Amino acid sequence: MSDNRSRFHCPGSGYSGSSARKEFKLNPCTGRRQSPIELSTPRRSEKLQRARADLRMHGYDGPFSQYKVNDTEFGVKLRVLGGLQPSLKGTGLPGRFLLHNLHFHAGLDDSCGSEHTMDGKTFAMEDTPLFLSQMLPGIPPTSYFLYSGSLTLPPYTENVTWMVCTQTLDVTSEALARFRDSASANSKGNIRPTQPIGDRKVILCS
């Protein structure tokens, strides 16, 4: 438990508020399928499994008629309340998944922000595919990682199938600065460090 605590409260990242510390104390993250993780492309990992990408995205090309944005103690969250109900279905996903909410992770500056890392590289922000498709409608990811993991917010429940796109989109420093300026301190540095992969399978669909 002490080892997990030291990794979780690393300098410059992690949830450092009193409520977050209380949640972490009650949920010491002793599971073996915690998220996020370090992801390696084929040139860096011989153990990576491959599969054909067949992701079908529905309802991502129209505006939300009803939604709510909250600046929570763990960061900015957008929840769809009505109108279009975006969904995902395809390779590695057990059934059809409906969008519930959108959560943003950002660093204190442009040098970090993503929770998952790829080949040792971190990115300035991490969010769900919904936000990306609003910027570029109708373009589904052609390559993505799949693995079994957990929520990266308390209570860190291990019932999540993660899909992490290999493609990234460019966001200007000015746009990131506006996001940080408009959000509370809880949305800056709300990055959980990567967790041990253990014996989990990571599949690259492409």
Image: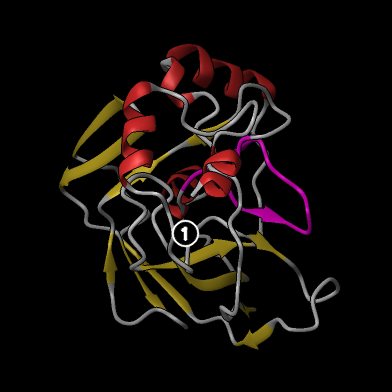
Q: Which residues are magenta?
A: 113-127
State which quadrant residue 81 falls in. top left
Please name the residue that numbered disc 1 is placed on: 138
Residue 151 spot, x, y in % from top left: 39, 54
The reply to whether residue 84 is visible in this rendering is yes
Task: Decide whether residue 42 is among the magenta residues.
Answer: no
Q: Quadrant of the C terminus?
A: bottom right
Can the viewer see residue 75?
no
Report the residue that reaches farthest toward the front: 2
Q: Is residue 63 above or below residue 96?
A: above
* View extreme (left): residue: 82
Q: Which residue is painted at 66% across and 86% down in the image?
A: 50
Image location of residue 169, percent across then percent down: 64, 45
User: Residue sitting at 66 percent across and 58 percent down?
Assistant: 167
Helix, strand or loop for the magenta stretch, by majority: loop
- Residue at x-position 43% and y-position 49%: 152
Question: Helix or strand or loop: what does disc 1 sit on?
Answer: loop
Q: Amino acid at mark 1?
A: Gly
Q: Position of residue 61 (x, y in %)?
A: 37, 54
Query: 167 or 63: which is nearer to us?
Result: 167
Q: Residue at image x 52%, y 23%?
A: 188
Q: Quadrant of residue 189?
A: top right
Q: Nearer the viewer, residue 119 or 102?
A: 119
- Say few, some or many: other residues with alpha carbon within 10 Å of mark 1 (under 14 / 14 to 19 / 20 or more): some
In front of the other: 26 or 134: 26
The quadrant holding residue 47 is: bottom right
The vertical placement of 139 against 152, above or below, is below
Q: Outermost residue toward the right?
A: 43
**105 left or right, relative to 110:** left
At which x and y percent is residue 122? Answer: 71, 44
Decide whether residue 122 is among the magenta residues.
yes
Coloured how?
A: secondary structure
